[in-house]
Image (tube, rainbow, N blue to C red):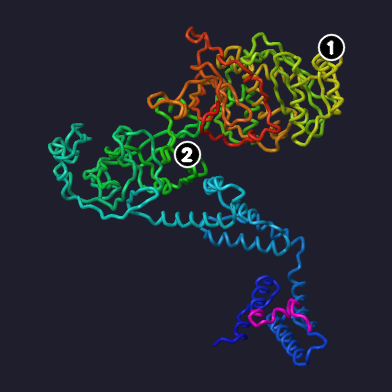
Amino acid sequence: MATSKDFLLKITKLNGENYRDWAFNMRLYLESMDLFGHADGSVENPAEDASELVREAFRSASKKAWTYICLAVEPEQQIHVRDTSTAKEAWDALKNQFARVSISQVVRLRQQYYSCRFKSGENMLDHINRIKSLHDQLREMGVQYDDKELAMTLLASLPENYNPLITALDAVGEDKLTFEKVKGMLLNDADRVSVTKKEDAYNVHRPYHRKGFKPKENKNEHDNQSSFRGTCHSCKKRGHYARDCPQRKNNNSPNFNKGKGSINCAEGESCDQKDVDEIALITTGNENQSGWIIDSGATQHMTYERDNLSEYIEFKRPCKVNLGDDRVILAYGKGTYRLSTDLNGYSQKIALKNVLYLPELKRNLLSVQAMSKLGATVVFKEDECRISKDSRLIGIGTVHEKLYMLKVIPEEYVNVTKKNNPNMELWHCRFGHLGMDNISKLINENMVEGMSSAKDADMSDVCEACVQGKQHRTPYPKKSSTKPTELFETVHSDVCGPMNVKSFGKSQYFVTFIDEYSRYTEVYFLKSKDEVLEKFKQYVNQAEQSGKRVKNLRSDNGGEYCSKAFDDYLKAKGIIHQTTVPHCPEQNGIAERMNRTLVEAARSMMFHAGMPKEFWAEAVHTAAYVHNRSPTSPLKEVTPYERMIGQKPDVSNLRVFGCIAFKHIPDATRKKLDKKSSKCVFVGYPEGTKGYKLYDLEKKSFVRSRDIIFQERTFHDFKSKENVEFYHKNEGDLDDSVVGAIINPNDRGEEIIYDDDVE
């Protein structure tokens, strides 16, 4: 029988590098001997009036504890305990020597903690334990990390292919995020990947519920012929299965129902009857229904649409598939199904390989396992499903009738919604006809997010819209004598107008406020110049919400800036008003130049799209939006947005102003046979809402929508006779909005996620 001394011998001796583990094991040993109180001092010396027997017992126990501690230390480290005489003295001496927390130790451990990365092929549990160990060591050193910080660090240590899983945690909520929850998800995912790699059997089954069965032999295949009332997929006549088709028998196919093969058979071979489970809900109903169900159980894609399969291989012997109601349908072949998924405004072409053809199906079935075997990641959330490959989104599913349905672009729109790798010319249009040198600068200097590496287009030809909108520009002085050093230290302002045409919101002017430090520009639309003070108050309120204050306002001597009310407001706010010398507008060059830039950009965009002049406010609004995300000469390597907000802007949502856009009509607002989209014109980016501002050509009104298919090279003909009356029916102040997001939480370069329309 093992003695206590045997356990002591099993403890690795303290060598100067293993104090943390040694102290824990030594404490366990001393606790088992009821001696640790002598080491940490929790057992006090006997009272003065205690008996000699009690005193002797105390001395004996203390000596034992001291002896055990000293024996558990390597000889070269015993120098630290030689001058001690009690267990507490020895314990404290070793703790002071090896558990001292230095700045260099904490820094080194923190570097290890935050740089820890999951390596390909590494066991997930080992990786999690390594991060947990570093976390515990830091806590022992006095660094306070809570459980949420540990969970976040674990997620940050994962490679990019785990991004879909991390996205799925958004449904959990940050307040409910725990280390154990993240650990459980990662270990479950590791188990799933391990099982998926081992699965070879062809196995189609019901999502969320699996039911055992025995495979049916392909024997009495003619028994149900007389009761079948469906249509033969071969001759298109009713009353018999394709396997019993007389035309097939006459075509020298006597072995149609014979032989064995493989599910991955080549042309001329047969399909082996593998174990096939139930498929749920996909054969119910009397009519075929479009769309693809995303099935977490099926191991192979299936379709009823033979005409959409290319590279089709027909099985000599069909493969049986058992349904949930004990019926059997047959797979007659396989092929490649090409489709374009709808990525909320983008289109992504994908090719599904080895798709089984089952003409009696009522729904197409997208197999999650088949996608996973190709390296794709499928993440289900409460109301959405996302499919990614190589960290790139390739498919989105939404819930319909309690099923996840893949969003697919209708065939008639596929050819006009290509958004993969748009070229320089298209980005030139999206950025409001920004100069090509600045477009190149955005890409080459990585100044924005969401802008794919554009292929160089031949831009040697002059852009006609730019000529019409920007020709004969007159230069202004480049710089003022002093430069601000912080946000809102100096704000420049100028009023532009009146325009010769009123906007849809009845505006005739616009006023700009430009922060000189960031060159971030905000635009307000005015019905009259008397509104300038009101708009400036709004601007100041927004600036103050960011923790800053406007210190100087620079403008011309216009009456809108020099009224008594304006002067009283500036004095109350402590804002210094710097006005230009009469007849010297150049002193307000920043604002003058900005207004001219916006007008020229708006003119170019409207000319390019063939837009009526009544859309000038929407065009100016858009011009300011893209300006804040574009390079500007006073700033080096950053955009006004980044200087103001503190992060790179995401420009993946930019579209060509004035292009055709098809807005999805929600199911709740249309009847079953009504069209599913309405034709609109894209006219800008609404503030406070994720999505786009559109002009509905049928309703003659402005709408805001998040679910759109764009045709960026197609524009509406407003000049044709049938389109003369395009005016907005519900005229209001839709264009009297501010461009800018210094405080706006919805404009942080976030990915646009579309769901229901917002009108």
Q: Look at the image and say whether residue 202 sits in the magenta stretch.
A: no
Say if residue 444 shows up in the picture. Answer: no
Percent coordinates x, y for residue 680 in the rendering: 51, 20
Residue at the image position 61 percent from the left and 15 percent from the top: 504
Query: Helix, strand, or loop for circle 1?
Result: loop
Q: Residue furthest bottom?
A: 52
Which label sits on residue 583? 1
Q: Which residue is mark 2?
A: 394
Percent coordinates x, y for residue 305 in the rendering: 31, 34
Residue 68 sits above or below residue 382 on the image: below
In the picture, measured across the screen, residue 188 lies left or right of residue 261, that is right
- Where residue 512 sits, quadrant-wise, is top right
Percent coordinates x, y for residue 492 in the rendering: 78, 23
In the picture, measured across the screen, residue 496 lies left or right of residue 734, that is right
Which label sits on residue 324? none
Stretch of the chain drawn in magenta: 29-45
